Image (spheres, helix red, strand yellow):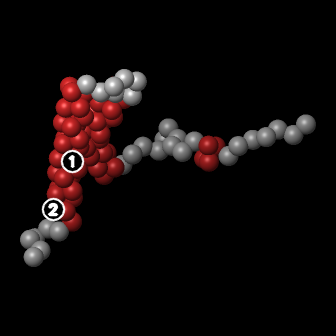
């Protein structure tokens, strides 16, 4: 009888000894407002999956969409400022 063995690196994407770098953690931290806004939007949409949305549900979804757009705009503006230092015209 042959044993089927998997390659550990292929099965486990991140081993215990592979930690995210400081740059990766900083990138996650800078994207956190956009991530949290996306989570809020998903929460608002999930609430309405099994029922007819009320006016309050619709307002909650609209507010969540605006927060997502604002967070993504702020992230894009910060990223563009980091890429083009020195006032490129």
Position of the C terminus, as image quadrant, is bottom left
Secondary structure beneath label 2: helix
Left or right of residue 65: residue 87: left
Q: Label 1: few (<14), some or many (≥20) within 10 Å?
A: some
Q: Up-down: is 52 above or below 29?
A: above
What residue is rendered at 21% in x and 56% in y? 76
Secondary structure beneath label 1: helix
| Residue 53 appears in the rendering | yes
What residue is rendered at 33% in x and 32% in y? 45
Going by the picture, which residue comes out furthest to the right?
Answer: 1
Q: Position of residue 66 (x, y in %)?
A: 18, 42
Q: Position of residue 44 (x, y in %)?
A: 29, 30
Q: Up-down: is 88 above or below 53?
A: below
Q: Position of residue 51 (x, y in %)?
A: 36, 23
What residue is rendered at 25% in x and 38% in y? 37
Residue 69 is marked as 1
Position of the N terminus, as image quadrant, is top right
Q: Nearer the viewer, residue 53 or 4?
A: 53
Q: Name the residue that disc number 2 marks.
A: 81
What residue is rendered at 29% in x and 39% in y? 38
Locate residue 28: give its quadrant. top left
């Amino acid at each position: 009888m042959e044993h089927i063995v998997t390659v550990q690196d292929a099965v486990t994407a991140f081993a215990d000894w592979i930690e995210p770098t400081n740059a990766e953690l900083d990138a996650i931290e800078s994207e956190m407002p956009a991530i949290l806004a996306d989570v809020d939007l998903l929460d608002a949409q999930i609430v309405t999956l099994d029922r007819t949305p009320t006016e309050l549900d619709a307002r909650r979804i609209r507010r969540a969409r605006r927060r997502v757009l604002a967070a993504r705009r702020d992230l894009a503006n910060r990223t563009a400022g980091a890429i083009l230092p020195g006032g490129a015209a």
